[in-house]
Image (spheres, rainbow, N blue to C red):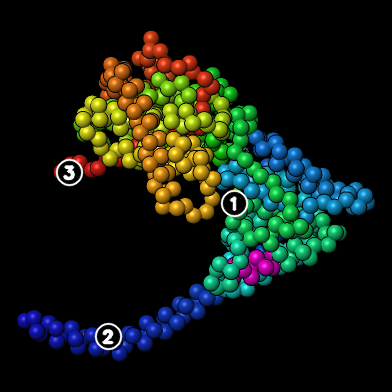
Amino acid sequence: MALLLIALTYEEFESWVTIWVPILFMGLIVFFLWRMIKVMPKTKPQQIKPESSISIGWDDVAGTDEARHELQEVVEFLRDPRRFQALGARVPKGILLHGPPGTGKTLLAKAVAHESGANFFSQSAAAFVEQFVGLGAARIRRLFAIARKHAPAIIFIDELDAVGGRRGSDISGEKDQTLNQLLVEMDGFGTTDDVVVIAASNLLEKLDPALLRPGRLDRQIFVSPPDVKGREGILRVHTRDKPLHDVDLAVIAQQTSGLTGADLANICNEAAIRAARRGGTSISMADFDAGLERVVAGMQSRRKLNDHERQVVAYHEAGHALCAELLPTVDRVHKISIVPRGRALGYTLNLPAEDRYLKTRQELIDYMSVLLGGRVAEQIVFGSITTGAADDLFKVAEITRSMVHEYAMGTGLSSSRMDVGGGELSDMTRRVRDQEQRDLADEAYRAAYALIDAHRDKLRELAETLLRDEVLDRAEIDRIMEGVQPPRPRTSPGLRVAAASDQPLPEPSGD
Ligand code: ADP
Ligand code: MG
Ligand code: ZN
């Protein structure tokens, strides 16, 4: 039976092979030819033309006053190049906007184009790097030729990092050729071509130094994350056409130190979405709170915790919060939650009142105490610790490392030596420094232990309230902490939005 079946199918198979394989083969050839024809025109002539109707102006950009101030000069030049040329002024031909992602570099370039009325040719550098060597270079050549014809014009090369890395690092040579062509074109600029090149990059250090030489991208403008006034301005831009109810943008600006313009735009959008979903007609402060939380801490996850896990997480977060409340140099707790979000099972959101970038040794120790507070609480209440504190420990290790190796804030054993930060360390020095790091972490751990041990009642109250309500806001924390005196007077609060979040516990088995 089985044999017969095989014989039959084999016969069929034979006729199938002789008839169908040649047909299939030809079909494949036709298919590939057709694919090639389809791809060719796309890589070849692809039209380069100025971007029409950019509606972004200075009004849409906030918090980047310095960059804007420098770019104003370019705007004036492009509006009336003759006025500058008549005086023999040398106007920058190449400008590099650099800074972290989301700070508004692309936005600024568009604003320059709009405000100057110049033709705007925008290309992402990644688009230049073609499959075939030499095509990227050809595209650059064409781009510059066309822009010259349409002068006054701006050539904007976004994400320059894609081709602008140090030469010699890519195997095909395509990137290097493209970059070389870019350099050639910029050198070939005459003083009468009213064309300005603006490029954007996230990391100045990674660019090929040849790009930054005089005559090329020789004016570098750093676009920094906004300060508190800047953040308020950006929030204002992004809420311009949104109905707000009792929303204090200045307060939100204070709560978002360290965030970029893109983050803030995101928060405004999330707030509007939340207002719409709850059927509101205007956006409230609570909507913004939710938007902020979502952007900073990530989306609420569906993960369900069992009772014991919830207890551990509640005490862990209560430990963080209690230390933060009791330590005067640390940011105030804005919110505690044991609703899992993103990778975190729970989190304690600390919000500073102002941006500050320098920290003293004591402030760093205090901050580490807050990070260790979660683990200490678990230890005190359950007598054991879980892997939930892994992320906290990682941060502590990072802090002690920079304290010892970069700031020479160790216990003093190795700081007296001259080799701080320099070259290879001897084995001996390394051992001493490792010890110093452990000592610093120990100091923070002991402080956290003493605080939590002395306020076990408050720890319990925070944790139990969390287990009941899942989320504690500032008012509730105030109520619970009432009458508790911080050991030292509160000085000005600290650094940035720090979501002390925790990695998941190990999956409970058989769950
Ligand atoms: P970058 O190019 O620096 O990565 P983008 O210019 O692409 O940043 O910014 C992304 C978005 O974030 C913008 O479209 C805008 O909505 C918002 N944004 C960023 N910075 C600002 C700013 N300074 N003012 C207003 N909006 C901003
Ligand atoms: Mg950009
Ligand atoms: Zn933690």
Instruction: Check whether the beta carbons of the residues at disc 3 and disc 2 lie within 8 A of each other.
Output: no
Closer to the eye: label 2 or 1: 1
Q: In the image, is 415 to the left or to the right of 375?
A: right
- CA neighbours of label 1 inside 10 A, class few (<14), some (14 to 19), many (20+): some
Q: Residue at x 49, y 36 (%)?
A: 409
Q: Main secondary structure of the magenta part?
A: helix
**Residue 402 at x, y percent in the picture:** 48, 41
Q: Which mark is residue 16?
A: 2
Q: CA distance from mark 3 to mark 2?
A: 53 Å
**Residue 416 at x, y percent in the picture:** 51, 40
Q: In the image, is 415 to the left or to the right of 376?
A: right
Q: Which residue is labeled 3 in the image?
A: 509
In primary-sequence order, the first of circles 2 and 1 is 2
The residue nearer to you, when weighing 140 against 212, is: 212
The residue nearer to you, when weighing 461 against 142, is: 461
In primary-sequence order, the first of circles 3 and 2 is 2
Q: Residue at x 66, y 44 (%)?
A: 222
Instruction: Check whether the beta carbons of the residues at disc 1 and disc 3 lie within 8 A of each other.
Output: no
Tell me the SS state at disc 1.
loop
The residue nearer to you, when weighing 295 against 287, is: 295
Q: Which residue is labeled 1 in the image?
A: 203
Q: Which region shows up in magenta?
A: 174-182
